Image (tube, rainbow, N blue to C red):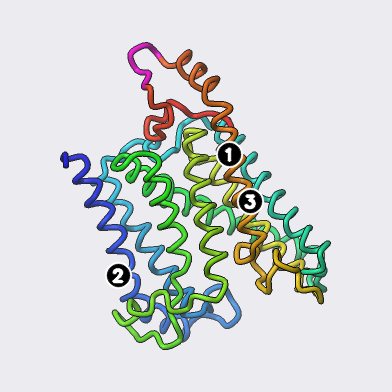
């Protein structure tokens, strides 16, 4: 193994081992502090499993500084953050619209099937505006942080080590697994949290894991297709925003929703979420195959002679950034 791959492997081990270890140790202390000082009913008044997952994510983001240096990521383009602002804004907006519209359409099907009903709300119009703005801002933050971590760094490092196909699968598996960090009720303090890190997994595990796995693969392939993170950030944020808005607007209806819509308030835990993610992934793969030759010609035409690489889909170069 060359020095480059050794450094990449070391950075991945530091992130994937260091963040859970330090986060699990810190979580009980953070939770005790919040239980004592956080105002009740606020975002800071969180359940223990949420505190654990946020601590691990927080330390993962902190560890990105040494990890990216070890991996040799220096320029914004190394993370899929190219400098064309107009194209970046366009791709974020297009991705967000696609994510929000597709997810709202899925909830609309559930509403038509009787799985959901319109919920009553005590919020005033002004309150709705504030609530919607909070949801949109939170969704965009989730999109930015998770895409930077899982696609910009993790997928980019794996791709440099094992190639595109293996990296897509590996990064998607890690992305899906991280979302199941839910310590069981018997989680003990300190290092004991590690023994029950996935103890709170629910009966909907199969559907939810499959949905997240397909979404993770889709977002990595979208990074490959566009050459940047921006479309993925928008798509990710659009999904999250639509799910949180729908959670506010809808309640479970009297119908059982059949096979497609289960008892969960999150469609990612239902068969409908699996089907939608699979259709999205199939559509993106089809588009990638259809656009491959024209894309190759366009990139070859605009990259100076001697710089062009046959591997167009290397997101680390920043040269292949395209519109969604």
First in sequence: mark 2 or mark 3? Answer: 2
First in sequence: mark 3 or mark 1? Answer: 3
Residue 166: percent from the left, percent from the top?
37, 45
Indicate which disc residue 84 carries.
Answer: none
Disc 3 or disc 1, which is closer to the eye?
1
**CA gap, disc 1 and disc 2:** 37 Å
Q: Nearer the viewer, residue 323 or 65?
A: 323
Secondary structure category for the residue under label 3: helix
Q: Which residue is mark 3?
A: 238
Indicate which disc residue 22 carries.
Answer: 2
Q: Residues within 10 Å of mark 2 (few under 14, many from 20)?
A: some
Residue 139: percent from the left, percent from the top?
59, 56
Is residue 1 depicted above or below 129 in this figure?
A: above
- Mark 2 in CB contact with mark 3 (< 8 angstroms): no
- The region drawn magenta spans 304-309
**Residue 36 falls within the magenta-colored stretch:** no
Residue under the point 68% across and 51% down: 100
Q: Which residue is mark 1?
A: 284
């Amino acid at each position: 193994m060359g020095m480059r791959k050794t450094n990449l492997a070391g950075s991945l081990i530091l992130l994937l081992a260091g963040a859970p270890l330090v986060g699990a140790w810190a979580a009980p202390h953070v939770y005790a502090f919040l239980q004592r000082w956080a105002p009740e009913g606020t975002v800071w008044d969180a359940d223990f499993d949420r505190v654990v997952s946020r601590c691990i994510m927080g330390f993962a983001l902190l560890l990105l500084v040494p990890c990216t240096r070890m991996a040799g990521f220096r320029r914004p383009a190394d993370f899929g953050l190219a400098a064309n602002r107009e194209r970046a804004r366009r791709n974020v907006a297009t991705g967000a619209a696609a994510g929000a519209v597709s997810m709202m359409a899925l909830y609309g099907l559930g509403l038509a099937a009787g799985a959901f009903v319109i919920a009553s709300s005590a919020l005033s119009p002004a309150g709705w505006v504030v609530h919607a703005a909070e949801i949109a801002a939170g969704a965009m933050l989730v999109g930015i942080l998770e895409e930077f971590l899982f696609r910009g760094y993790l997928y980019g490092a794996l791709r440099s080590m094992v190639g595109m196909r293996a990296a897509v699968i590996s990064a998607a598996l890690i992305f899906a697994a991280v979302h199941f960090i839910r310590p069981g009720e018997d989680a003990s303090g300190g290092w004991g949290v590690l023994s029950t890190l996935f103890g709170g997994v629910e009966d909907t595990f199969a559907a939810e894991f499959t949905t997240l796995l397909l979404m993770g693969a889709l977002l990595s392939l979208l990074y490959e297709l566009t050459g940047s993170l921006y479309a993925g950030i928008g798509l990710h944020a659009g999904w999250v925003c639509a799910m949180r808005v729908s959670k506010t607007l809808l309640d479970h209806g009297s119908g059982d929703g059949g096979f497609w819509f289960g008892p969960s308030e999150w469609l990612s835990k239902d068969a409908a979420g699996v089907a939608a993610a699979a259709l999205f992934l199939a559509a993106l793969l089809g588009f990638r195959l259809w656009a491959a030759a024209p894309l190759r010609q366009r990139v070859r035409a605009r990259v100076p002679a001697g710089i062009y690489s046959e591997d167009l889909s290397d997101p680390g170069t920043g040269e292949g950034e395209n519109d969604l």
